[in-house]
Amino acid sequence: KNEVEQSPQNLTAQEGEFITINCSYSVGISALHWLQQHPGGGIVSLFMLSSGKKKHGRLIATINIQEKHSSLHITASHPRDSAVYICAADNNNDMRFGAGTRLTVKP
Amino acid sequence: DGGITQSPKYLFRKEGQNVTLSCEQNLNHDAMYWYRQDPGQGLRLIYYSQIVNDFQKGDIAEGYSVSREKKESFPLTVTSAQKNPTAFYLCASSKRTGVTEAFFGQGTRLTVV
């Protein structure tokens, strides 16, 4: 079993839909990261969480430390949100990555 | 602006040649990391360094070498001993200890033909 599991692996949505991507981890963490990888491969760091909830524009990330679970939500999704979203469990910079969720948002 | 820079974004090499990927940061971070990503798989740790002139093997170090002569720079050499070098390579950096944010480079896609 992988230390970091993401679901779903692939997700197709219509523009405007509310998106949720889930991440469960089995390792101890000091923080959890959400990354966005664009089709060309470039990676952008979206959030680093150690508790609670963070919001940036249409993106919201939550974490439940007791349940070892985090979610990334995208409100009012747009085709430009199409990317691979990666969850990473960070144990004092010992990073373990999920396999990613490929999101396609159709106009 | 502070950040972490990888170059080049795309790299092509012939089989049997060594190739060096560049990673530079101006964040004054002590720790730097190299990861590899294969299609459908998560990123895996190749090497990491927590201080100048010191580095440690990660989960998949075979066929790779690194150096850390300067705090700002952590180049990765993909040697001819690496059996499947074609992959996406990602560099990251962070402060040495504690709950600190990791910064990621844009990545280098290496294709060996």
Image (cartoon, coloured by chain):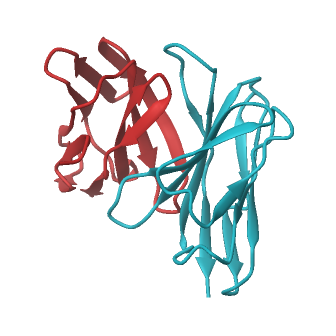
Q: Whole-percent x and y of residue B74? A: 75, 45
Q: Whole-percent x and y of residue A97? A: 37, 43
Q: Is residue B89 above or below residue B93?
A: below
> What shade has chain B been given?
cyan
Residue at 71%, 33% in the rendered image:
B3
Residue at 74%, 70% in the rendered image:
B19
Which quadrant holds residue A102? bottom left
Residue at 80%, 36% in the rendered image:
B53
Which quadrant holds residue A48? top left
Q: Is residue A71 above or below residue A14?
A: above
Q: Whole-percent x and y of residue B26? A: 79, 30
Q: Is residue A61 above or below residue A3?
A: above
- Quarter holding the C terminus of chain B? bottom right
Side of A90 where A98 appears, left or right: left
Which quadrant holds residue B18? bottom right
Side of B9 where B60 appears, left or right: left
Q: How many marks?
A: 0
Residue at 52%, 59% in the rendered image:
A41
Q: Residue furthest left?
A: A67
Side of B35 where B2 appears, left or right: right
The chain in red: A
Q: Whole-percent x and y of residue B64? A: 64, 62
- Quarter holding the N terminus of chain B? top right
